Image: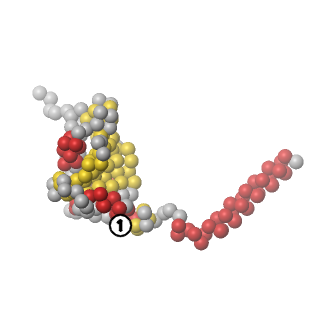
Amino acid sequence: MARTLRWGVGLLLVVSLSIGAFLFLPFRSWLPGGTVADVPLSQVVNGAAFNRLFPEPEEGDQLVFTQEKRGFSEARLKRGGQLKALLAISDVTTAPEARNKFQASPSRLQGWPLVEQGPQATALLVADRFQVKVIGQGEGLDPEQRQELLGRFNLQGLAALQPATGPRAALPGGNPSAGRQSLERLASPGPAA
């Protein structure tokens, strides 16, 4: 009896899943895949293209990339094993409401609007499309340190970045393989004396 019961439950499960899949077929346009926030994937910059635009770590610092997806890349800036700041670049094409906070900003960095977001975060809107953010961690960074760190991103390269129709976006006139890098970059010590 137990064997028959197991087979019956298994068959019932398979039939239920098949019927469920058939019923959801008309709603497949609601399911994820092919878009990011109702924006076609071809219009969103791949997160891998952002990695080469992050600032080079200073001596003793370590930049560890922790998240990368379509329209977003994030790295942790560490010093001596302690988390110093989170750094992020996002394509606001996927979240146009993110632009709103920059509209009334009187502050500018290299000509782009800059906003303070609480005591630990500073964000910059580059080319009305890319949000660059520094969030202090632990003891944190003061606003001047966060702004200095934002200024070390390759902001001109970011402003020139366009979505690619292929799997990777490339800087205009640049080498598409130049963005390939390891997940961790260490500041190299200066030349030996």
Q: Nearer the viewer, residue 15 or 127?
A: 127
Q: Residue farthest to the left?
A: 193
Instruction: State whether residue 108 appears in this view.
Output: yes
> Which residue is painted at 36% across and 58% down in the image?
71
Which quadrant of the rendered structure holds the C terminus?
top left
Hey, which quadrant is residue 167 in on the image? bottom left
**What residue would you read off at disc 1?**
43
- The residue positioned 22% from the left and 57% from the top of the image is 105
Q: Position of residue 144 (x, y in %)?
A: 19, 42
Where residue 119 sits: x, y (%)? 29, 42
Q: In this view of the protein, which residue sits in the foreground, 5 or 109?
A: 109
- Residue 5 in the image: above or below residue 36: above
Quick check: 107 above or below 93? Answer: above
**Type of the residue with mark 1:** Gln
Q: Characterize the local packing of mark 1: few (<14), some (14-19) or many (20 or more) Cα atoms within 10 angstroms.
A: some
Q: Is residue 36 above or below residue 10?
A: below
Give the x, y percent position of residue 1. Answer: 88, 48
Residue at the spot x=24%, y=59% of the render? 104
Percent position of residue 125, x then y = 25, 57
Taking depth in this image into account, of 136 and 86 the one nearest to the observer is 136
- Label count reads 1
The answer to whether residue 51 shows anywhere in this view is no
Residue reaching furthest to the right: 1
